Image (cartoon, grey):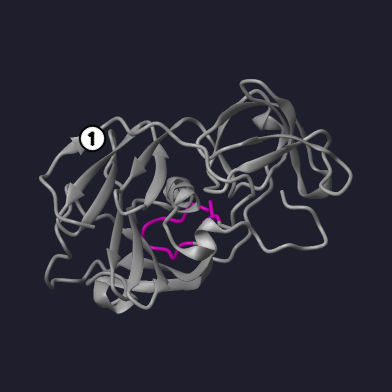
Amino acid sequence: MPARARRLIAAGLPAVSAALIAACGGTPSRTSPTPSTAPTSATSPTPSPTPVIVGSSRTVLSPLGLRIHSAPALGSANVVGNFGQGASFTVLDYQSGGGGWMKVQGRSTTGWIVADPTLTAPGSFNRYAEASGFSALYPQAWAFQQESYGTVFLPQQGMQSILLETGTTPGSFGPRGLPGYSQSDTGPVQVCGYTGTLSYYVKEASYTGATPTALPVPRLPLYAEIRLTLSKTEAVLIGFNYQNSGQLDVFGDLYNSLSFPFPLCEAPAAPTSTPSR
């Protein structure tokens, strides 16, 4: 990402529609350890949504959009519409069968969508977009700030920070993790069709060395990082500095919405015997 004049932007660009197939992704664990304990495994499953979501408003995260079905079934139900990335809807009903389904009301269509928590998220989002083709959704209660080393997403209240940075290879970002942080867990994760490594780190209380790259907010006890290889000359780092793993939702929502102009991200899922979502 090119260096730009430092500025804080509280309002994002309008969300745009994408293709109409559900994208791959992953969701970080929601368990909340204390700063002195290791975060839950990167590969821990996330509980399915429950009927408490009925009546809530949610937003589509998937860069490739999401299909709306006439009934809660993939194989036998007609596709009656679709949501593009950033589309908002109200949840009317929830069924746990078939992996979980939500009955939803959009602006003009009512139907059923899969309840995969990597594809939608509660609340409203703004869209961040780069001229280079990288884009992501971030909560309306957050802002983003351009720095010479990348884009930093910040809550308007709080000290968490998400860094989005591009480079030539994963090694171009320097050593994994941060100085003064010990790795506690690691596992694979998919971001828009590309498989990377999601690693968790805990800050060492006894560390007295150099402070990691300066941020607009203080460093916090926990850190999570994803490194992706997109091509022979392009890589992405997504890092999250946070207080407790109850704050991991916003990290998962951002990387599940991340889009970039590389083939696996732009293409729909490979055909299977089961219709696409």
Residue 7, image quadrant: top left
Residue 91, image quadrant: top right
Q: Position of residue 168 (x, y in %)?
A: 28, 73
Residue at 56%, 57% (x, y): give it: 25
**Which quadrant would the N terminus be assigned to in this image?**
bottom left
Q: Position of residue 183 (x, y in %)?
A: 38, 73
Q: Is residue 207 visible?
A: yes
Is residue 2 placed above or below 229 in the rendered structure?
Answer: above
- Taking the image as shown, residue 16 lies to the left or right of residue 210, namely right
Q: Position of residue 89 (x, y in %)?
A: 60, 27
Give the magenta range. Answer: 27-39
- Taking the image as shown, residue 231 lies to the left or right of residue 98, namely left
Tag 1 secondary structure:
strand
Residue 226 is a magenta residue:
no
> Which residue is label 1 attached to?
9
Residue at 59%, 53% (x, y): give it: 23
Q: Amino acid at mark 1?
A: Ile
The majority secondary structure of the magenta stretch comes to loop
- Taking the image as shown, residue 43 lies to the left or right of residue 210, namely right
Residue at 41%, 73% (x, y): give it: 229
